[in-house]
Structures are given as C-alpha cells and as structure tokens.
Amino acid sequence: MWIPPTPDQVLTPTAIALGNFDGLHRGHQAVIAPVVQHPDAWATVVTFQPHPAEYFSGQPRALLTPLTEKQAILERWGVQQLVLLTFDRELAQMSPEAFVHDVLHGQLQAKHISVGADFCFGRGRQGNAQLLRQLGELLGIVVTIVPEQTMDGERISSSRIRELLLQGHVEAVEHLLGRPYELMGEVIPGRALGHRIGFPTANLQLPARKFLPRQGVYCVEVLAPGWTQPQPGVMNLGYRPTVDGQTLTAEVHLLRWRGDLYGQELRVQLRHFLRPEQKFPSIAALQAQIQQDCQAAAMYFHLPLEQLEPT
C-alpha cells in the first residue's frame, strides 16, 4: 500500500474513505468498503496526523492502531493508498468549503468520498456529512454517508473499545473489531528470569503510542514471520511486582513451542483475560501460579495438558 511522502505524490484520481479511523473496527470497515472496489480511482483512506484530539489537547494520545498496524490492516482490506493529512493550525482553521474545494477536490482529485453519518470537518467542526454531500455535488463528487453501525443495540466506537480494553473484556473488543486486539513488537533481551524458573518468555518492545489493555495475564495466540499457524500462549502485561519490576513489560510464554525469537516481530492476539497482575510472597509461589495460568490457558485452547511441553 502506498503512503505518499509528500502531497504531490498522491496517486489520483481517488475514491476516499475519510475519517480518523483509530481502531479500524467494524464501523470503520463499513465506511471503507464502498471505495475499495471503485472501478476508475485509487482506493484511498484519508486520515489525520496527529489525531485532532491530540492537536487540540496538546497531550500525546495512545492509539488503538499505530501507523504500522493500521497499514497492515488496510492492506488486508484492499486499500491501495493511505494519505496522512498533517493536522496543524492551517488545516484546523480551514473552512469546510475550502477543505472540500482545495484538499479533497483540488489536491486529491476525489471522485467518490465515503464518511460516517457523524463525520464533522472544517473550522470549529462546522461541516457535517450532509454539507459534504452538498459541496460534493457542486464539484461532481459522489458522497456516500454510511449509517451509524451498531452491535447488540450499542454504537460501535473507538471510545467504547478503549473502555472495554481497560476492563480486560477482550472478547467483547474482538466482537466490535471483527478480529482480536493485537499487540505487535520486536522480541528483545530481558532478565531471563522466566527461563530460570522454567517458563521462558519473549519480551516484547511495544510501540510507544500503543493503547494498552488492563494489566494482567491473558490467553493469547502468537504469530511470527514464517509461521503458518498461530501458537497458543500466556502473556503477562505489567510491572512484575514479585521481582520489583520498574517498567511496564509484555512477556509471552508459548505453551507448545521453544526456540530463539530474538529480533523477530511478533503479533500477539489477546483472546481471554485470566487474572489481574499480583505480587506473590516468593518466587516459588510465582512459579506455582504461572503453572496454573498455563493450565488454564490450555483448557481455554482445548489443549491436552501433556501438550504443554515442547513438541
């Protein structure tokens, strides 16, 4: 998928799905779907960098889908181009009319634009989806307004997904995303404590801006380059209070696989929350609990307990 490094390198004409798209949940997919199979325009997602909420608050914002992850998902959905509009003072102060005429029509040569029904744009959020449709008609641009997407009677939204993640409800998040929530990161050397106590772990270096779920222990499935099937495992996300950990870490123990993963990029899919992180009185007590966690994960994945050993 092409990410133009400068505005003059955008592939045109375009069929645009327009929005913030943090999370890329089922609602976002409904907005993107109308432009993917456009017969005579580049299927393009247009979003903003930084997120407008971050620009106006001045505070860094953790993202459900950092850029690398967003790119991978959009590629799987058939998007050909991702355009990142710099959200700065100039863009924030642009009128709705100027944004449509100068950016969408002039710069991006949009033939078709798809937005959610609640989409707002322009200075002070003065523009909405209906105004976009009216302005588009004047310029020969077809505008699709996708109705609000709901599931189980509740609106699908990134804010709802964030709330559920903080509660550890990863199954509900998977329902809203249409896929498991993932943590992606490179395996880096750790303290090797897990190996010494019989449960070797892969320590992930997570993106600095990734939105993290509730701290604790999870049943996970792990993918690495070259693997055809995900491997079941247990992940601890937290500060490791039993061994006086000082930094937040994500440590993954694979139930049926052993090997050197250093330097590899892992995709860790969160399947089920087992328990909160806790401090144990001794390393022996920690070992016993990890063993229980592995057994609980084996039951969750319907694995015979004897398969916990390397195969």
Image: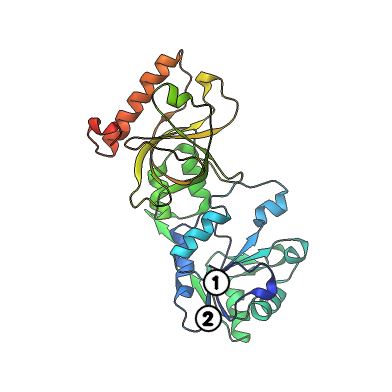
Q: Where residue 57 sits in the image (x, y, percent)?
A: 71, 49
Above or below residue 69? Residue 170 is above
Q: Can you see residue 148?
A: no
In terms of depth relative to the viewer, which is nearer, 230 or 109? 230
Which amino acid type corresponds to the residue marked 2 in the rendered image? Ala
Give yes or no for contact between labels 1 and 2 (Cβ–Cβ under 8 Å): yes
Residue 136: quarter of image: bottom right
Q: Can you see residue 7?
A: yes
Q: Which mark is residue 44?
A: 1
Residue at the spot x=38%, y=44% of the render? 171
What distance separates the C-alpha of mark 1 from that of mark 2?
9 Å
In terms of depth relative to the viewer, which is nearer, 262 or 50? 262
Q: Where residue 278 sits in the image (x, y, percent)?
A: 47, 22
Q: Which mark is residue 112?
A: none
For numbered disc 1, what is the local secondary structure? strand
Mark 2 surroundings: few (<14), some (14-19) or many (≥20) residues within 10 A = many
Q: Where residue 288 sits in the image (x, y, percent)?
A: 36, 19
Q: Which mark is residue 41?
A: 2
Residue at the spot x=33%, y=24% of the render? 292
